[in-house]
Every structure is written in C-alpha cells, then in structure tokens.
Image (tube, helix red, strand yellow):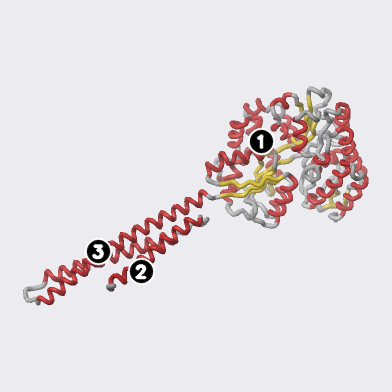
Amino acid sequence: MNNSERKRRPWRVLLAVFATLAMFATACGSTAVDTSAADAANAAAEEAKAAAAAAEQRAADAEAALAEAGSGTSAEDVAAMQAEIDAANEATAAAQAEAEAANTAAMEAEEAAAMASEGDEATRSINVALVGNDNITRMGELAAEYFTPESGIEVNLTVLDEQTLREVTTRDVGAGGEQFDVVQIGMYETPQFGANGWLVPLNGFAATSTTYDIDDLIPAVRNGLSVNDQLFASPFYAESSFVMYRSDIIDNMPEAPTWDEVAAIAREVDSDEMAGICLRGKPGWGDLGAAFTTVLNTFGGTWWLANEDGSIGASQVDQPEFAEALNFYVDLLNDAGEDDAANSSFNECKTLYEEGKVAMWYDATVAASLFPDDVVENTAFALAPTKETDASGWLWAWTLAMPVSTSDREAAWEFIDWATNADYHEIIAAEDGWRAVPPGTRTSLYERPEYLEAAGAFAQRTLDAMLAAPIDNPGTTPRPGLPGVQYVGVPEFQDVGTQCTELFSAAIAGSMSVEDALADCHIIASEVSS
C-alpha cells in the first residue's frame, strides 16, 4: 500500500461512521434530532475538497517546473520531474474522487437527519385522560379524524368513569407524575390545582392563538376556572342542574318548583313500568355527592362551618338540616326512584330516561344536548328545585388542563385549543347537528341562530340555570374554602365526600340506616375540622 493510500483510508472510515450514525438516529426515531453526523460529514467534505485543490496545485507546480527546465537539465532530473507530475496527477485524481465521496456522504447524512426530523414530527404524541361521557368520548373520536391528520400529533386516550378519573388525575397531577400531558378535570379541582402550582396557566397560549378567543368564554365559567385572573383550564362544556321531565306524562310541573312539589309529582306518576324520578345514588363526591349537596344546601344544611380565616370549622353532619335533607333524598328514591338507585349516576339515569323507564330526572343540564330527537320532543325542563333558598342549581365545567409535568406543552396546548375553541363547534355541528354542540362555555354559541333553533327547547333554560347558580352563596350558612355549589371548595372534601357517599349509598340500598350513615359520616367529617 502506498503512502497516499494510507492517508486516504481514514476519510473513508470517518464518512462511513458519519452516515451510519445519521441512519441510526433515523431508525431509532429520536425525539431530539441529532445533526452532528451531518455536520461532521460536511466538514469532512470541505477538508477533502481542500486536499483535492492542494493536489491540483502540486501537479500544476510540477508541470511548471518541467516547462522551465533548460536544455542543460539532465535526463535524470527530467525523469524525476515527470515522475513528480505523474504522482501529483494521481494524487489529484484520488483527492477529487475522495472529495466527491465526501460530498455524497454529507448529502446522505443531511437526508438522514431530515428523515429523522420528519419521523419525529410524525410520531409526536400526547397522552390525554378523559371522562366517559358521550359528548367527550365523541370528541376523542373526532380528534382521530380531524386533529391528528391536521397536526401530525397522535392522541392517546384514557377514558375513565368520573370517580376513577378524579382519583387518577388528582394522584398523578398532585405528585408531579408524567402519565398525562392533558387531563380532564372540573371546576372543583381547577382553582385548587392552579393555586398549588400543579397546572400550566393558559393565558399566554390563548393570547397567541388565532382560534381560541379567551374573551368569548362565559364570564362565570372563566372566573370559576381562574386564579388571580390566570386561566388554568379550558372548558369543554359547562352546565348547571335542572329537572328534565316527560311533558306527555307530567302537566303540572312549575317552572321553578320546590323539592316538595317535585317529590309529590314523582310519587304521583310512579308505577311498576315507570319510576317517578331518577336521582344519583352511586358513591362518589361528584356522583351522589353532587346531587345530594344541592339538596342539602337548599334545605339549610352544610358539611362544615367556616372558621374566621375561611378554614374548615366544625362538622355539621350531625345537625337537623343535614338529617332532614338525607332522609328526604333516601325516602324519595325508595318511594318513587329508579331500580338499583345505589348504583346509578349520570350515565345510568340518562339511559333510563331515554328508554322511558323514568318520568323525570334531576341532573346536569348538558344531558339535554345528548338526547335523541324523539326524547327531546317529549321533554320539558324546570329549574333546580328549592326549599329554603332562591336557587339551588350547581355550576360545573368539564375542562382540559395541562399539568406542569407535560413533556410537550406546545402539542398539549394545540389539542386543548382545538377541542375547546369555537371552530370545534362547527365540526361537531357538521358531524352531528347543532343540538349536539357542547354547551355552556362560549357566548358566541348563544348568538348563533343555527344553535338557538336546533337547541331551542333547552338552550335558554341552560343559560338561565347557569346564571342563577348560587356559586358564591349556595346555602344558608357560610362555608369554608373556594366557591362551589355541589361541593365544598377544600381539598379535604374529595376524600370526605367519597367516604360519606359510600355510607349514604348504603342507606339508599337499605343495607344500613340513615341514622348510622349520618353518625359515621360525622366522625369522618370531624377528623378534618380545625
């Protein structure tokens, strides 16, 4: 092997290494594209070009020297000069070939880096936790059809029932876990999680979005999801609660009934074929706890008193108003409620109502947007029933929020924006009709003639119920924590409410007495009093 060949071999080895590294990055689908191989290959190509130029100059110098040689130059010197020219030409050809090879390798390395970048974009994904309600799971289906093809972002969905979702998201987000990039939480969790620093504020993202329009959010909903004017979750739909009833069966329901009036009508129409009313009885602070707490509030009861500093005071579970409310709720279900009420919540009652097995249903206003046409035609709506207060309906929003542990905030926001802006309303309207648009979040929806025509049976009633929701003063007694109607805005309520509703559900099922359920719940609630 000659000396010039030895000098050239390292170039080939290096170029092969550079190309291999670039291809390896592509094959691995690296999430951060490494361009060092391409950069090194380009540098090698430049050095090879410089070597070729130097070899050309060497050949030119040798030829010039031979041309200037005089007649007195010996034949031996002329032969040496010619040998130098031949060697220089050979070196030039080899260097030029090496430069071409280096240039080719650099181009291949750049192509590999570009492929790695495209591959990274194509495999970009986010993990999203959702509640298993019809219009929310529908959004997940449409995300695969619209969002992913447009954005290149895969959406991996985890769909859970309400209670499980709350437990999983609270545990993961509170512990700084990285299980989810976007979580569905409600108006109870959002201000608490936001104040704790667990969520990414969305104002900055919204300000740069051309589609979101934060000022279009209904003020009461926006305020309920904000801390110090920072929005910490974007509402997918918002709701209050009201009574939905069969207008072809019930003709004496007041527009703003009392609970006594509702109970009397339910008992009157109850039969073996059709229950008089459906109420939540499934354990969970957001299941049975939500519906029951609105009854408790308007009966003049509360879970705890508030200390002067707003902290949790003495438990009020042992007070007469609490006992009156729970006895009323349990008795109404036993006398005129659905079968297996202890295992019923929103989805179960919705199914029973649509199947004609219950004559009325007290629950979330969003239900009306999910009914089939034939059900809507025979349904009328009344405000949430009251007793001692002027209003009792809850205020709630299912939202999409971004934990601070999210690995790709831009992708997470892109999904949140898509799912909760007014353009999504256009998508769902085109797919399923205007009546199916998620209600209660944007002022612009209630200015759309198409929506008002399609949802005329319940659109204004829903808005009226939300505006009437007594979020700042839901009962007759000041409560601790942040504002809320169907929950107490303190972290402790999640555990206390869940434990106590397990007891209340047992009372509904008849496996324990109301008195025992109240006594045990009072002990649980007292443990967090200060």
Quarter of the image that includes the C terminus: bottom right
The answer to whether 230 is drawn above or below residue 346 in the figure is: below
Q: Residue 462 at x, y = what percent? A: 72, 32
On residue 497, the disc is: none
Amino acid carrying mark 3 in the image: Ala
Which mark is first along the chain, 2 or 3? 2
Whether residue 64 is visible, yes or no, is yes
What is the secondary structure assignment of the residue under circle 2? helix
Please tell me which residue is depicted at 19% across the width and 72% down the height of the picture: 84
Amino acid carrying mark 2 in the image: Pro
Q: Residue 421 at x, y = what percent? A: 60, 39
Please tell me which residue is depicted at 75% across the width and 36% down the height of the picture: 364
Q: Which residue is mark 3?
A: 93
Image quadrant assignment for residue 71: bottom left
What is the secondary structure assignment of the residue under circle 3? helix
Local packing at callout 2 (Cα closer than 10 Å; few below 14, some 14-19, many 20+) is: few
Q: Is residue 357 left or right of residue 422?
A: right
Which mark is first along the chain, 1 or 3? 3
On residue 438, the disc is: 1
Q: Residue 50 at x, y = what percent? A: 29, 65
Quick one: 308 or 407, which is closer to the camera?
407
Q: Which residue is mark 2?
A: 10
Q: Is residue 107 left or right of residue 117?
A: left
Image quadrant assignment for residue 342: top right
Q: CA distance from mark 2 to mark 1?
A: 65 Å
Please tell me which residue is depicted at 47% across the width and 50% down the height of the picture: 118
Whether residue 231 is visible, yes or no, is no
